Image (cartoon, grey):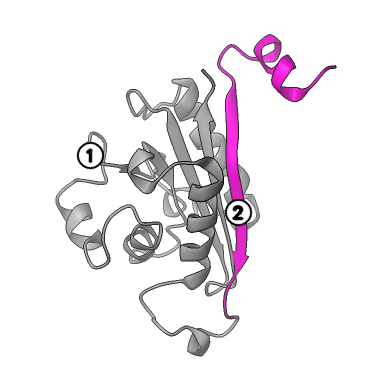
Amino acid sequence: MLTAKSLSGELVQTPVDILASAQTRGSPRIAGHPDLCSFEATVKAAALAYAAAGVTARDIDVVELHDCFSIAEIIDSEDLGLMSRGAGGAWAAEGRTGMGGDVVINPSGGLLSKGHPVGATGVGQIYEIVRQLRGDHPSQVQGARLGMTHNLGGTGVACTVTILGRSA
């Protein structure tokens, strides 16, 4: 029987697997968030995606996350569990989220570098991670094997977290 998995090696030299994708929802009102420095939808989507993929935040090599505002990278990276709560700002300032850091966040430049293309955000993030995992990204993270995307809509109303991996 023909399947996407069985054909992938014939179609591309370096297939990339979708290991997990989780979508959750949060409050449609900013006043409905118990913590203004966290989005519950992101925390839940990340937990579901990690569990489905059988990985943890420490396993992720590269992330394209929803940095619609300068503070968003810090909040999102903490909500994704990439570092402990309250450490996101220090990690960014110390270069721990930059190229060669502990976990590389938005090596593409993120949404702000693209003019925040609202409708195309999720597809664009997946494209960036697939190129990273195939090893042909202009801002290549050396040895990247696991990548994650994070897309947040509204004021935390909807969140999708996807984990991708380079096929063995």
Q: Quadrant for the N terminus, please.
A: top right
Residue with the most extreme left position: 94
The part of the image, by quadrant, that contains residue 85 is: bottom left
Q: Is residue 54 left or right of residue 37?
A: right
Residue 59, horizontal then vertical, whole percent: 36, 39
Numbered marks: total: 2
Q: Residue at x 40, y 65 (%)?
A: 69
Label drawn at residue 101 = 1
> Disc 1 versus disc 2: distance between alpha carbons?
26 Å
Around disc 1, counting alpha carbons within 10 Å, would you say few (fewer than 14), some (14 to 19), or many (20 or more)?
Answer: some
Which residue is the site of mark 2? 22
From this view, report whether residue 78 is shown above or below residue 11: below
Q: Position of residue 40 (x, y in %)?
A: 48, 72
**First in sequence: mark 1 or mark 2?**
2
Q: 123 above or below 81?
A: above
Residue type at tag 1:
Gly
Position of residue 117 measured from the top left corner of the image (x, y, whole percent): 57, 54
Q: Which label lies toward us, 1 or 2?
A: 2
Q: Position of residue 97 (x, y in %)?
A: 26, 46
The front one of 125 and 42 is 42
Mark identifier at residue 124: none
How crowded pointer 2 is (Cα within 10 Å; few <14, some 14-19, many 20+) is rated as some
Q: Secondary structure at mark 2?
A: strand
Q: Is residue 3 magenta?
A: yes
In the image, residue 27 sits, relative to residue 21, either above or below, namely below
Magenta-drawn segment: 1-27
Q: Is residue 11 above or below residue 37?
A: above
**SS under mark 1:** loop
